[in-house]
Image: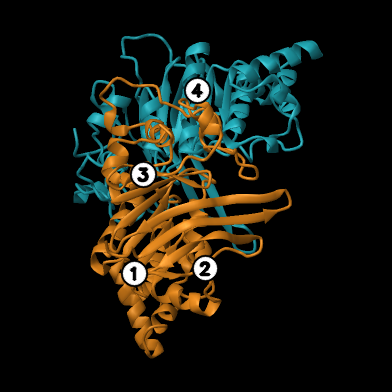
């Protein structure tokens, strides 16, 4: 089997707080192959964003620290790398876009300057050439009048357009992996559709892999090939998108899918939503066994004693459940 | 102001029962001030002539994207924001003509719950005090013991524990805080509850808990809801009828199932097709809208949607379409769709 592009093994990213150690990411295994889109789903506080930021080492340390694990990028562990070495990876191989583009764009530089800066990291170009390159990137992400807009400041763009600018900037270094952390969560649904389509187009054009972090199961179903479901700092299920939605095996995944109202089923008799009772556990003192046991309707005594291992239940389909 | 336009209602014309709430040609223009004299230099047409009725016991969903005026509409109905013009009739009374005391009394029957369960609860008050406040204001209890009994009863109604009454808002999760907000609204036994994005800030598994709670409470207390949200799946799930808003205007109103099966307005159609479906085996044709929602300071002339509309014709920029009953109970504002 070919070596995965990114292979995260047993990653633990913990945070020291006044109340104690928060085990935000507590033993995560996941991998991404070249050119695929992996969805990482879960609710607030499940550790999906911390996992993504750990890959680029965008975690403040302290209070954060890598407690254990490896982050293998094309076979090379990123965790021991120096900041200078990480800068090279960040600029050229792995790019990231965030939920709120305004906070990741510098408000006092034009978007052209900001994109040109990234382009200049790769090629020796005059400023004029780099700005022309930036305009070309804006054109690629379908921003109208790119020659003129390249001289505008971030606040002159709408939310959807800013996310296009972020994508242009991320892609201008032609990364092998794009990490998209809730890229459409702050956008209206018609704009979300535009951005998801754009990401798909760009993926086909540049052949990069995407790690899509989201809480929206609909977005995952429409854009990903494989999915990793996280709950309270652990991976609870991993499968192809067809297997995950067609035959979800973890009670949490099942609950997540059944708790969403379905627009496309309006003609059928309206069913009551299947809510998952209770709330997520406190990650300061996570329960000893399965983290979902307290909310699980199938929980047995054994569930509260030890964290169940990930077991393979079908080709490429893994579940962390004793059932 | 212009005469009240005929408004989309659930009931047929022959039905003489008055709706619980009638909104006619409601408008809210926010002034934009500028210059050293702070003169009014422009206006945002947040709500631009909205009319609808809500029948007792139904849920009218209001959907639309950011800036379409759905939240402002909700707040204008309660006069939390003073409308610029238009009429609001609640239980046969003219809300726009009410003085402060009358408004206060009216709000016993019309309550609101907000999106952000963090910002809408006073952090210095205990849950008991938050829920009990309205009971005291409206003099609905006559002793400390009665107050406490009622608060306990309300907490249990929304799925919280009696001992929660002595705790403070920061001790609760988002879903629990939304339950507290609901308990506070229910305290005065309202008839109409305006729900302004009540589940938008919640995770999906918690969102489902709150939606189920709202459905149970509606059945138990015969509540009527005005349910404002941007999430079409949620609105479709909970609503009897749905109003779709775009740039301050209602472009379509229809029974929920009908709107989803046979939308008339091209905007509703595009909005529906943009909702991602959590099932990889479902493949749909997506109608991709070009560009962004225009600036509500200078909305496009004629039909506000014509700049993004896939079927727009030249005269769409000249003439504003009015809401017409294109099918029984199904109203839409479009020149070229029937």
Circle 4 — which element? helix
* Residue A79 badge: 2
Give the quadrant of residue B324: top left
Q: Is residue A183 visible?
A: no
Q: In this structure image, what is the colour of chain A? A: orange
For the residues marked 4 and 3, what is the alpha-carbon distance in whole angstroms?
Answer: 36 Å
Viewer-closest of A146 and A235: A235
* Residue B130 on image: x %, y %: 71, 28
Q: In this structure image, what is the colour of chain B? A: cyan
Query: Which chain is indicated by disc 1?
Result: A
B146 left or right of A91 in image: right
* Residue A3 on image: x %, y %: 32, 65
Quadrant holding the C terminus of chain B? top left
Which residue is at 51% across, 12% downward? B220
Query: Which chain is indicated by disc 4?
Result: B
For the residues marked 3 and 1, what is the alpha-carbon distance in whole angstroms?
Answer: 26 Å
Circle 2 — which element? loop
**B126 lies above or below A237:** above
Q: Share a chain, discs 3 and 1?
A: yes
Give the quadrant of residue A156: bottom left
Q: Residues within 10 Å of mark 4 (few under 14, many from 20)?
A: many
Residue identifier under label 4: B214
Residue identifier under label 1: A176
Earlier in the chain: of badge 3 and badge 1, it is 1
């Amino acid at each position: 089997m070919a070596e995965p592009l990114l292979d995260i093994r047993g990653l633990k990213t913990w945070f020291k707080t006044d109340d104690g150690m928060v085990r935000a990411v507590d033993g995560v295994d996941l991998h991404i192959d070249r050119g695929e889109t992996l969805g990482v789903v879960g609710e607030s506080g499940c550790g999906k964003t911390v996992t993504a930021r750990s890959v680029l080492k965008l975690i403040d340390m302290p209070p954060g620290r890598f407690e254990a694990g490896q982050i293998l990028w094309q076979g090379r562990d990123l965790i021991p790398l120096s900041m200078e070495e990480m800068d090279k990876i960040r600029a050229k191989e792995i790019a990231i876009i965030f939920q709120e583009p305004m906070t990741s764009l510098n408000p006092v530089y034009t978007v052209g300057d900001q994109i040109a800066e990234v382009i200049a990291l790769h090629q020796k170009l005059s400023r004029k050439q780099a700005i022309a390159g930036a305009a070309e990137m804006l054109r690629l992400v379908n921003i109208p009048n790119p020659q003129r807009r390249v001289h505008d400041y971030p606040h002159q763009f709408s939310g959807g357009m800013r996310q296009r600018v972020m994508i242009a900037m991320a892609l201008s270094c032609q990364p092998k992996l794009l990490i998209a952390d809730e890229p459409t969560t702050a956008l209206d649904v018609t704009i979300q559709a535009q951005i998801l389509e754009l990401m798909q187009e760009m993926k086909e054009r540049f052949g990069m892999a995407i790690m899509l972090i989201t809480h929206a199961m609909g977005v995952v179903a429409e854009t990903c090939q494989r999915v990793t479901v996280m709950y309270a700092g652990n991976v609870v299920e991993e499968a192809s998108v067809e297997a995950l939605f067609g035959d979800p095996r973890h009670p949490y995944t099942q609950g997540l899918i059944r708790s969403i109202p379905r627009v496309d089923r309006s003609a059928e008799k309206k069913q009551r939503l299947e809510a998952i009772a209770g709330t997520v556990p406190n990650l300061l003192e996570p329960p000893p066994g399965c983290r979902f046991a307290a909310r699980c309707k199938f929980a047995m005594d054994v569930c509260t004693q030890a964290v169940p291992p990930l077991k393979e239940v079908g080709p490429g389909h893994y579940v962390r459940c004793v059932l | 102001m212009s005469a009240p336009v005929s408004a989309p209602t659930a009931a047929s014309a022959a039905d003489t029962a008055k709706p619980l709430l009638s909104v006619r040609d409601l408008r809210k223009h926010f002034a934009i001030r500028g210059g050293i004299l702070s003169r009014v230099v422009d206006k945002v047409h947040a709500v631009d002539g909205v009319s609808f009725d809500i029948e007792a016991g139904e849920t009218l969903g209001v959907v639309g994207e950011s800036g379409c005026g759905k939240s402002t509409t909700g707040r204008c109905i309660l006069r939390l924001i003073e409308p610029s013009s238009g009429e609001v009739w609640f239980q046969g009374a003219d809300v726009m003509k009410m003085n402060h005391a009358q408004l206060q009394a009216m709000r016993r029957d019309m309550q609101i719950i907000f999106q952000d369960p963090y910002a809408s609860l006073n952090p210095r008050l205990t849950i008991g005090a938050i829920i009990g406040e309205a009971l005291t204001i409206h003099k609905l209890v006559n002793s400390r013991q009665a107050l406490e009994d009622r608060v306990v009863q309300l907490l249990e109604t929304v799925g919280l524990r009696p001992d929660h009454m002595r705790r403070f808002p920061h001790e609760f999760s988002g879903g629990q805080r939304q339950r507290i907000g609901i308990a506070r609204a229910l305290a005065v036994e309202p008839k109409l509850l305006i729900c302004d994005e009540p589940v938008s800030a919640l995770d999906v598994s918690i969102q489902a808990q709150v939606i189920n709670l709202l459905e149970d409470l509606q059945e138990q207390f015969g509540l009527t809801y005005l349910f404002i949200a941007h999430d079409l799946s949620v609105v479709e799930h909970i609503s009897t009828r749905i109003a779709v808003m775009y740039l301050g205007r209602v472009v379509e109103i229809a029974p929920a199932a009908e709107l989803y099966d046979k939308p008339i307005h091209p905007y509703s159609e595009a909005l529906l097709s943009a909702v991602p479906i959590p099932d990889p085996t479902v493949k749909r044709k997506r109608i991709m809208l070009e560009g962004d929602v225009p600036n509500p300071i200078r909305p496009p002339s004629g039909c506000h949607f014509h700049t993004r509309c896939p079927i727009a014709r030249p005269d769409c920029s000249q003439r504003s379409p009015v809401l017409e009953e294109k099918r029984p109970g199904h109203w839409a504002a479009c020149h070229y769709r029937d």
